[in-house]
């Protein structure tokens, strides 16, 4: 049996369960504050993650995985790095491995959702839909165990053919034995069948039968409300299921301080602490609002609940909870950090380095907010080449099939220049390559408050209007006759994102 070098132990742990729209960074940090040992993020779909780029957010001190539309799909920070488990929705072993490798340096574990019964998860054969395909389950888990450096787990439900009589759960036990042989580190079992909902009783007997069958840790799940209403109930549920650890979902969503040995904290205190994290980590207000509504529950019609319901921004949420001054102070600090980062000179960000391929490379991006609205780096570079009587710059742009990001190499005077950062459009990638060339030559590039060369008036490119279609025709600057070939990296293989 193959087992990864484990950095995460699943014995005797209190775990925040993966919950869609709930398991974002503020809630995970709050659960850790209140005593959770391990926290799972919400289920994130493999296809969506493969479109993301990893971005170090220096202003927030976070690592963000950002979609092409600039939406943050997954955000994490150093505080939780050794205790956060990334849960993915997948139905394909190779996509699953690609996602695991994308995030493995920023998380403590990788989990595959095989238990969620909702259409969000089951469409495309993910979630609980996987339970009807043991061969696919085995392939996904085996591929992950062999291919990633983090411990791999999965979360399942009991199969519909369960027979509780004499604790015989033939189909479920056969499946979990097969899962164990893949080398996973632990398995979470929600003690309900796929078609059952929270109003149906959880089967402690089914979880216990699995725990007594396997040698790896079994994590009991599904005990909220029926069994878990306070901290001491968590241990009672663990003993009733003979599980190694307990994963708490709804009870933790209602009040994350359920993990405290001393007992839960007042809800008002918990919500204020959650809001502080949400503001500090720039959580989208709609997600913050959703989580707070789950905490308020029956008090949604209270005066505070009505204020929360009417809130249309993070500031209004803060004001509803008496945190208006905190919001203003925190946002001022964040804005100051962002401004300081944007004001850094190129020399403070990176130094040019020539690699063995002869291409001069830098880790740069074209951020239109930092440049004059009248000129772009490409325009500066073209004008410089004309003044120096050099051949016009030639851009060669490629696209990665895996995530559909672009990278461009510009050739000027037989020297090639390239940014090591891949971008979401062909235009942005070409601008980044031009920046590398200009900076390596010590030339102006059109940044704000930068003295640049006098340029002939010409139509300005608008990278923010790019459609992302590599076949789209961009405006050609007057007099710019250089060819811009587009190269496909796919070697006859179909992109895993085809049709997404």
Image (tube, helix red, strand yellow):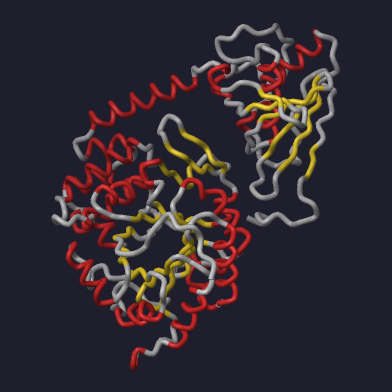
Instruction: Return the residue nearer the eye: 331 or 492.
Output: 492
- Look at 42% across and 76% down and name the residue there: 194
**Quarter of the image where the C terminus is located:** bottom right
Say left or right for 428 vs 262.
Answer: right
Q: Residue furthest bottom?
A: 166
Q: Which quadrant holds residue 455?
A: top right
- Look at 45% across and 65% down and name the residue there: 185
Count of numbered circles in the view? 0
Note whether 50 is above or below 328 in the view shown.
Answer: below
**x then y, percent, for residue 424:** 63, 38
Instruction: Return the residue nearer the eye: 225 or 304.
Output: 225
**x then y, percent, for residue 494:** 74, 57
Note whether 201 is above or below 274 in the view shown.
Answer: below
**x then y, percent, for residue 410:** 76, 26
The answer to whether residue 253 shows anywhere in this view is: yes
**x then y, percent, for residue 402:** 66, 50
């Amino acid at each position: 049996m193959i087992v990864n070098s484990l950095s995460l132990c699943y014995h005797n742990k209190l775990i925040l369960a993966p919950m869609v729209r709930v398991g974002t960074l503020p809630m995970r940090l709050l659960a850790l504050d209140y005593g959770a040992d391990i926290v799972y993020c919400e289920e994130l779909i493999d296809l969506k993650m493969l479109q993301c780029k990893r971005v170090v957010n220096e202003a927030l001190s976070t690592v963000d995985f950002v979609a092409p539309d600039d939406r943050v799909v997954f955000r994490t920070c150093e505080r939780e790095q050794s205790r956060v488990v990334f849960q993915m929705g997948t139905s394909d072993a190779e996509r699953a491995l690609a996602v695991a490798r994308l995030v493995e340096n920023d998380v403590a574990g990788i989990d595959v959702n095989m238990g969620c019964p909702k259409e969000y998860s089951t469409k495309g054969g993910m979630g609980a839909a996987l339970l009807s395909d043991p061969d696919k389950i085995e392939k996904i888990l085996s591929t992950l165990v062999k291919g990633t450096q983090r411990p791999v787990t999965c979360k399942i439900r009991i199969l519909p053919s369960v027979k509780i009589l004499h604790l015989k759960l033939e189909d479920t036990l056969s499946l979990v034995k097969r899962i164990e042989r893949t080398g996973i580190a632990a398995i979470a079992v929600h003690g309900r069948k796929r078609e059952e909902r929270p109003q149906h009783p959880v089967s402690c007997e089914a979880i216990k039968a699995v725990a007594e069958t396997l040698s790896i840790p079994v994590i009991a799940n599904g005990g909220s409300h029926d069994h878990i209403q306070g901290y001491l109930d968590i241990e009672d549920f663990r003993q009733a299921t003979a599980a190694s650890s307990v994963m708490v979902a709804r009870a933790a969503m209602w009040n994350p301080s359920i993990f405290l040995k001393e007992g839960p904290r007042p809800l008002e205190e918990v919500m204020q602490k959650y809001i502080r994290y949400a503001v500090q980590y720039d959580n989208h207000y709609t997600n913050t609002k959703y989580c707070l509504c789950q905490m308020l529950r029956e008090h949604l019609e209270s005066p505070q609940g009505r204020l929360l319901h009417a809130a249309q921004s993070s500031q209004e949420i803060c004001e509803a909870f008496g945190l208006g001054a905190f919001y203003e102070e925190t946002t001022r600090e964040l804005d100051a950090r962002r401004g300081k980062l944007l004001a850094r000179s190129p020399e403070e960000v990176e130094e040019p380095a020539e690699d063995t391929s002869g291409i001069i490379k830098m880790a740069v991006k074209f951020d239109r907010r930092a440049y004059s609205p009248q000129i772009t780096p490409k325009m500066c570079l073209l004008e410089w080449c004309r003044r120096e009587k050099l051949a016009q710059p030639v851009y060669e742009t490629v696209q990665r099939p895996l995530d559909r990001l672009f990278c461009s190499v510009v050739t000027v005077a037989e020297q090639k220049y390239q940014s090591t950062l891949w971008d979401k459009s062909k235009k942005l990638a070409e601008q980044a390559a031009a920046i590398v060339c200009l900076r390596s030559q010590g030339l102006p590039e059109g940044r704000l408050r930068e003295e640049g060369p006098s340029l002939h008036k010409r139509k300005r490119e608008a990278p923010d209007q790019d459609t992302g279609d590599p076949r789209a025709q961009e405006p050609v600057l007057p007099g710019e006759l250089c060819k811009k070939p587009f190269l496909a990296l796919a070697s006859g293989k179909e992109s895993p994102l085809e049709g997404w």
